[in-house]
Image: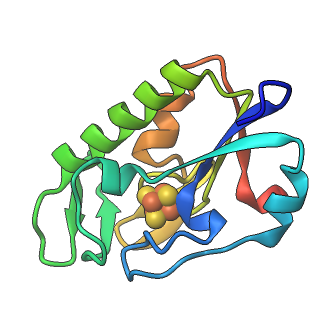
Amino acid sequence: MSINKKTAMVSACLLGINCRYDGKTKLNTHIFKFLEDYNIVPFCPEQLGGLPTPRLESTKLNNNKLINKNNKDVTDQFLRGAKESLKIAEIIIPDIVIFKEGSPSCGLNTTNINWKREQGSGITAALFKNSNIKLLSDELF
Ligand code: SF4
């Protein structure tokens, strides 16, 4: 890490890490270009919450609970992942955080509710919205 650079936390799947539920990535090379002058810290809330990779896809329900495709309640794992991600932010104090839209964890402006992409925030993004950190959507890039 360079001490002269700013720091960005980024949803790890955007950086080419194969951490998505399907074991794949959502690499966005434009983000690397934008972050040339940043130290980059990847994070994946669902992995931090103890879920395996690959894993069953999950969605939020209207009552803020989360279930996976087997109807198993995974709310605790999602909450744990959100808190662990915020813990990382509290340690490294990033200048920005870039979140992956549409995710039940990372979606900043859109998330997955009842298996559909809807306006709203994922569990982790919602927690970060209570901080003073600058939050950016991957769809800006
Ligand atoms: S939880 Fe976030 S970082 Fe992990 S795969 Fe989903 S969108 Fe990417």
The C terminus lies in quadrant: bottom right
Q: Residue at x 18, y 56 (%)?
A: 74
Provide residue 102's location: percent of width, then percent of height: 55, 63
Q: Picture coordinates of residue 140 (x, y %)?
A: 83, 56
Whether residue 11 is visible, yes or no, is yes
In the image, 117 versus 138, the foreground residue is 138
Residue pictured at 67% horizontal, 74% vertical? 27
User: Can you say which quadrant of the picture contains the N terminus?
Assistant: top right
* 12 sits left or right of 70 in the view: right
Quarter occupied by residue 57: bottom left
Judged from this view, the residue extending furthest toward the front is 2
User: Can you say whether 61 is above or below 91 in the image?
Assistant: below
Tell me how many marks there are: 0
3 or 9: nearer the eye? 3
Relative horizontal placement of residue 70, taking residue 68 as reference (left or right): left
What is the quadrant of residue 19 in the picture?
A: bottom left
Quick check: 29 above or below 77? below
Above-or-below relation of 109 to 86: below
- The type of colouring in the image is rainbow
Is residue 103 among the parts visible in the rendering?
Answer: no
* Left or right side of 26 for 56: left
Q: Residue at x 34, y 31 (%)?
A: 83
Q: Point out residue 96 in the picture as x, y percentages from the top left corner.
A: 73, 34
Q: Residue drawn at (34%, 67%), measured in percent from left and top?
A: 114
Q: Choose between 127 and 20: the one closer to the eye.
A: 20
